[in-house]
Image (cartoon, rainbow, N blue to C red):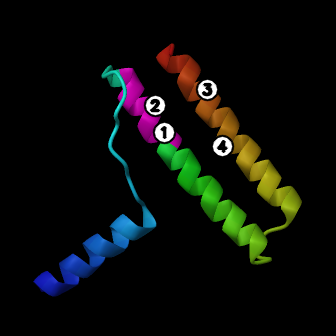
């Protein structure tokens, strides 16, 4: 059982890598850094799907543009 949980933990770390925050500590900066890492990860998936031919360039562009707008909105709401 522990072997399965170790495998899942390693798989999760591989698929969703997180890096420590090294900037000035403010809660809103930490939240924005988390949002930025998630944005980066999702853009990476979209790019890989488009490269593999599973997603058209137009769809990839539209999805990335939508993610960018969400990130900008989140930044404005945090007043950074």
Which residue carries the number 2 mark?
A: 32
**Distance from Cα at disc 3 to Cα at disc 2:** 11 Å
Report the magenta stretch's main SS.
helix
Residues at marks 3 and 4 touching, judged by CB atoms closer than 8 Å: no
Residue at x 35%, y 74% (from the top left corner):
11
Give me the C-alpha separation between circle 4 and circle 2: 14 Å
Badge 3: residue crowd in 10 Å (few <14, some 14–19, many ≥20): few
- Which mark is nearer the camera, 3 or 2? 2
- 6 on left or right of 11: left
Q: Is residue 12 above or below residue 52?
A: above
Cα–Cα gap, marks 1 and 4 = 10 Å
State yes or no: residue 34 in magenta. Answer: yes
Quarter residue 26 falls in? top left
Residue receiving disc 3: 73
Asked if the residues shown at circle 3 and circle 2 are in contact, with their CB atoms under 8 angstroms apart, the answer is no
At a point 72% along the width and 48% down the height, the residue shown is 64
- What residue is shown with label 1? 35
Which span of residues is magenta-colored? 28-36
Q: Are marks 1 and 2 in contact (CB under 8 Å)?
A: yes
Sequence order check, earlier mark of 3 and 1: 1
Q: What is the residue that sits farthest to the top in this orientation? A: 79
Q: Find disc 4 in the rendering and name its residue.
A: 67
User: From mark 3 to mark 1, how far is it between C-alphas?
Assistant: 11 Å
């Amino acid at each position: 059982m522990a072997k399965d949980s170790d495998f899942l933990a390693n798989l999760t770390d591989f698929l969703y890598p997180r890096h420590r925050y090294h900037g000035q500590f403010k809660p809103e900066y930490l939240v924005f850094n988390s949002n930025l890492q998630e944005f980066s990860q999702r853009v990476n998936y979209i790019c890989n799907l488009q490269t593999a031919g599973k997603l058209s360039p137009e769809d990839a562009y539209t999805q990335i543009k939508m993610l960018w707008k969400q990130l900008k909105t989140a930044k404005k709401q945090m007043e950074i």
